[in-house]
Image (spheres, rainbow, N blue to C red):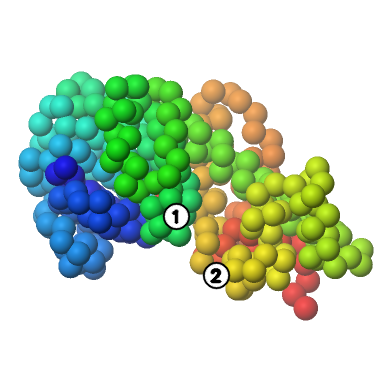
Amino acid sequence: MHIGFLGLGNMGGPMAHNLLKAGHQLYVFDVSATAVAGLTAAGAQEATSAGAIAKAGVEVIITMLPAATHVREVYLGDDGLLANVQPGVLLIDSSTIDPMSAREVAAAAAKNGNPMIDAPVSGGTVGAAAGTLTFMVGGSEADFQKAQPILAAMGKNIIHCGDCGNGQVAKVANNMLLGISMIGAAEAMSLGVALGMDAKVLAGVINSSSGRCWSSEIYNPFPGVVENSPASRGYSGGFGTDLMLKDLGLASEAAKQVRQPVILGALAQQLYQAFSMQGNGMLDFSAIIKLYRQEN
Ligand code: NAD
């Protein structure tokens, strides 16, 4: 297929590479020339703006942008996608943004005659490179079916979550739970070790008992417990504290709009915020365990 791709950063770059590998013809745009060069070297064609992508005769356009402000600008701006795209072209936004913005942009697209789905991802940069992302999709059944084979070139699990915006709902709910559970795992591991237990033995007990969760088993925050985890390499790589903070902010904001209490989510947000303010925003979010342990 002829596909337009905007936003070729840490996630979008490898995702676009996987579309090329699957045999699709790609037209790409990013405000960073370096990001574009990586894709043109692999065979993609460069476009000079969002509007130019929309006019390139593509059948589908995918965006992978930092936040809602960028998504609004790219879709709704004067030289944006909606001002230039032909009706009928399928629009897929994979950025993580708040559900309300996703619904607003999808409504504007529908007025323009363009089907649109929100399809945020989970799986990080490793999943993006390996083509094993999970896509959480919001949109009509027909649009989901149309997008499915395209998303399958970039991901392994593609889940239809309901109408427009529900992909973002699933994403913020999941990541809020992840943020909370990581703090729980950090607190429990720190307590056990402070009381004299070996970290690996403690993790082994938790992971065969009722406290087990992804944060204790796959991504344990205590150094040395899980080989190759961020905790075992100085909290480098992985999912940055500031990215977790962004997602917890989206959860709090979305919760406020429906007057839904997110007590632990808000507390988790404050803890990651304090940790980020101390200069740790680039560390993997499992480094939150540092709040509980004295360095040496
Ligand atoms: P990134 O900052 O690495 O990439 C974003 C890209 O968008 C950059 O190359 C930037 O130049 C480009 N961009 C910004 N404004 C633009 C515009 N107006 N037109 C065209 N391009 C523009 O971010 P990322 O890590 O790739 O994340 C992208 C999205 O995926 C975010 O919403 C993030 O929350 C989400 N996400 C990230 C991860 C992760 O581990 N990095 C995991 C899951 C979801």
Give the residue type at disc 2.
Ser
Residue at left offset 54%, top offset 23% = 258
Q: How far apart are marks 1 and 2 (CA)?
A: 17 Å
Residue 99 visible in the snapshot: no
* 196 up-or-down from 91: above or below: below
* 79 up-or-down from 230: above or below: above
Q: Position of residue 184 (x, y in %)?
A: 74, 49
> Which residue has dot 1 on it?
127
Does dot 2 land on a helix, a strand or a loop?
loop
Check mark 1 vs ligand 1: CB closer than 8 Å? yes or no. Answer: no
Give the residue type at disc 1.
Gly
Residue 170 visible in the snapshot: yes
Report whether 258 appears left or right of 50.
right
What is the number of the mark on residue 209? none
> Which residue has dot 2 on it?
236
Residue 196: image quadrant is bottom right
Q: Where is residue 114 in the image (x, y as percent from the top left)?
A: 20, 27
Which image quadrant: the C terminus? bottom right
> Of callouts 1 and 2, which one flags the residue occurring earlier in the amino acid sequence?
1
Mark 1 neighbour density, 10 Å: few (under 14) some (14–19) many (20 or more):
some
Residue at left offset 86%, top offset 60% = 192
Residue at left offset 28%, top offset 45% = 63
Residue at left offset 64%, top offset 63% = 287
